[in-house]
Image: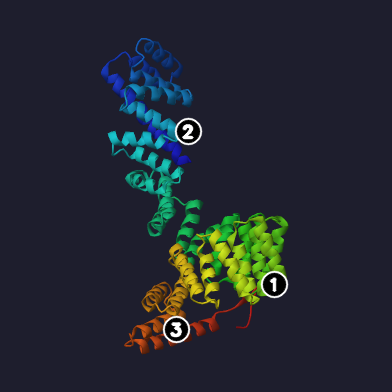
């Protein structure tokens, strides 16, 4: 990165200035070497240090000066070795530490952060060292460790905008989207950059502001030269209700990079959402001509085939997906869904039970397992099995509201009304307009004898149901065609 090179140059200037000033002031016999380094006569400087080292091999200042000479000759590995030799004799010598750290940082050696931390223990307010350490941690994907050093090097942000971009990146990577957005916006105002603009759009999307994200991305979409930009634009357009543009951008993304499976999957999802199943299958078929061994594409096609009751074709695709990638647990989930739709609930429960054992950390699978078990007529033992699976699902993903609602219903079946009430209340905090969760709350309160507010809750549930029905009626339904989508009659 350009910022990295500028930081290294600044560090090198500091090193040389420190070495030359210290040596010139002490009037030692290194003064001649200092003059040679200042004149960039590195060969002569190296010869002079080697001559003196013959009689003073433990002189850490001479070792460091030889490191500076070697670094000036672009012999970085040897220079690093010289600085490290100096540290053997003088572990806290700043010149040796800075020289070794600079080279380790430039060469991305694993101990660069440790060397920089040693400098900070001696000089805790050095912003250049903080900046280098922040960049080193970011390069190792250790953003949590990088953040305090980015913050300590804020004074360099104006002159090194990519430092602030690294700071914003690490803020976003650790989930601090608000501060990340603020820093990306500042960057765009002071030093417009395509990467910062793209990342700001992603952060705004993470903040659930698709409209702002799409506006941020708009200048990049006008260029229409990046598959990742087109892909993100399509997702944002769909979330803002502009399905026709989403389709257009997705088609452009697929043409830009026919080998990116995610674009075909996004198109399949779009087709599924708008009940344009055949159009989705046609696009997945096109994807399979490019990626014939993609388990995810076979899975996507199978899901679409289920919607048009092509069960045999769907089963074949799910089996093919599982053969290609046995770890793709959703392929087995989908098999269970097909068998459930064929009213083969016993086979579906068996599949989910087996796959839940193989994939214990798949929250969706645990939910589907719980749902299948809840529909079984096997009695109390299967009810306990369903409850345990639902509890595992919310332990994996506490924000998955359908699992909370299911668990509330299961607790009611098991006469555990207080636990049911707790789950219904949490579900409603996640999704306040879920009339099913509200119904479970009403039933739980009745069981507990808490009847004071039941009439109010019933009225609230009816209002929510009416609002949901009206929104479904008013929402335009788009049907995707082979080329241009059209709005259908609601």
Image position of 187 (left or right of 334):
left
Q: In which quarter of the image is the C terminus?
A: bottom right
Instruction: Give the crowd class for mark 2: few <14, some 14-19, many >=20 residues within 10 Å.
Output: few
For residue 228, above or below residue 417: above
Distance (Cα) linking label 2 and label 1: 57 Å
Task: Count how many numbered circles sit on residues in the image.
Answer: 3
Question: Residue at label 1?
Answer: 311
Asked if residue 174 shows in the view, the reply is: yes
Instruction: Give the crowd class for mark 1: few <14, some 14-19, many >=20 residues within 10 Å.
Output: some
Mark 3–mark 2 CB contact (< 8 Å): no
Identify the secondary structure beneath mark 1: helix
Mark 3–mark 1 CB contact (< 8 Å): no
For residue 429, above or below residue 21: below
* Between 9 and 488, the one nearer to me in the picture: 488
Identify the secondary structure beneath mark 3: helix
Percent of width and height locating residue 351: 60, 66
Residue at 55% across / 78% down in the picture? Answer: 377
* Between 56 and 362, the one nearer to me in the picture: 362
For residue 108, above or below residue 287: above
Residue at 32% across / 34% down in the picture? Answer: 119
Determine the image quadrant of residue 67. top left
Instruction: Give the crowd class for mark 3: few <14, some 14-19, many >=20 residues within 10 Å.
Output: some
Distance (Cα) linking label 3 and label 1: 35 Å
Distance (Cα) linking label 3 and label 2: 61 Å
Q: Of tags 3 and 2, which is closer to the observer?
A: 3
Which of the labelled discs sits on residue 80, or is there none? Answer: none
Question: Residue at label 2?
Answer: 107
Percent of width and height locating residue 439: 43, 83
Identify the secondary structure beneath mark 2: loop
Which of the labelled discs sits on residue 464, or is there none? Answer: 3
Nearest to N terminus: mark 3 or mark 2: 2
């Amino acid at each position: 990165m350009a910022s990295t090179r500028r930081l290294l140059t600044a560090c090198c200037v500091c090193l040389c200035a420190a070495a030359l000033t210290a040596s010139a002031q002490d009037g030692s016999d290194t003064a001649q070497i200092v003059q040679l380094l200042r004149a960039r006569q590195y060969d002569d400087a190296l010869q002079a240090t080697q001559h003196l080292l013959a009689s003073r091999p433990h002189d850490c200042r001479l070792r460091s000066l030889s490191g500076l000479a070697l670094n000036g000759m672009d012999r970085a590995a040897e220079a690093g070795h010289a600085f490290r030799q100096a540290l053997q004799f003088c572990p806290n010598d700043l010149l040796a530490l800075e020289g070794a750290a600079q080279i380790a940082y430039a060469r991305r050696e694993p101990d660069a952060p440790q060397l920089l931390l040693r400098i900070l223990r001696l000089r805790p307010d050095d912003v250049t060292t903080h900046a280098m350490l922040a960049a080193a941690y970011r390069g190792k994907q250790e953003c949590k460790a990088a953040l305090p050093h980015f913050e300590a090097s804020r004074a360099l942000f104006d002159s090194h905008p990519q430092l602030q971009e690294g700071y914003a990146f690490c803020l976003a990577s650790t989930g601090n989207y608000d501060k990340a957005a603020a820093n990306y916006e500042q960057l765009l105002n002071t030093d417009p950059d395509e990467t910062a603009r793209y990342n700001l759009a992603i952060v705004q999307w993470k903040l659930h502001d698709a409209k702002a994200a799409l506006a941020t991305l708009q200048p990049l979409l006008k260029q229409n030269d990046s598959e990742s930009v087109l892909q993100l634009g399509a997702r944002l357009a769909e979330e803002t209700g502009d399905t026709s543009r989403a389709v257009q951008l997705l088609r452009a993304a697929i043409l830009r990079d026919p080998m990116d499976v995610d674009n075909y999957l996004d198109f399949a999802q779009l087709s599924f959402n708008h009940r344009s199943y055949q159009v989705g299958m046609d696009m997945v078929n096109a994807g399979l001509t490019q990626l014939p061994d993609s388990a995810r594409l076979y899975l996507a096609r199978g899901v679409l085939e289920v919607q048009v009751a092509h069960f045999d074709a769907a089963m074949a695709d799910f089996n093919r997906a599982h053969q290609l990638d046995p770890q793709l647990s959703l392929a087995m989930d989908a098999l269970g869904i097909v068998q459930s739709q064929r009213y083969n609930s016993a086979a579906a429960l068996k599949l989910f039970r087996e796959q839940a054992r193989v994939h214990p950390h798949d929250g969706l699978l645990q939910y589907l397992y719980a749902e299948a078990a809840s529909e079984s007529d096997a009695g109390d033992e299967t009810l306990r099995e369903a409850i345990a699976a639902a509890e595992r699902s919310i332990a994996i993903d506490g924000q998955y509201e359908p699992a909370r609602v299911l668990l509330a219903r299961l607790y009611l079946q098991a006469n555990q009304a207080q636990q049911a009430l707790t789950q219904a209340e949490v579900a409603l905090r996640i999704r306040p307009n879920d009339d099913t969760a509200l119904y479970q709350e009403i039933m739980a309160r009745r069981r507990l004898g808490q009847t004071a507010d039941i009439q109010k809750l019933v009225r609230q549930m009816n209002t929510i149901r009416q609002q949901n029905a009206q929104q479904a009626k008013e929402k335009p339904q788009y049907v995707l065609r082979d080329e241009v989508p059209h709005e259908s009659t609601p």
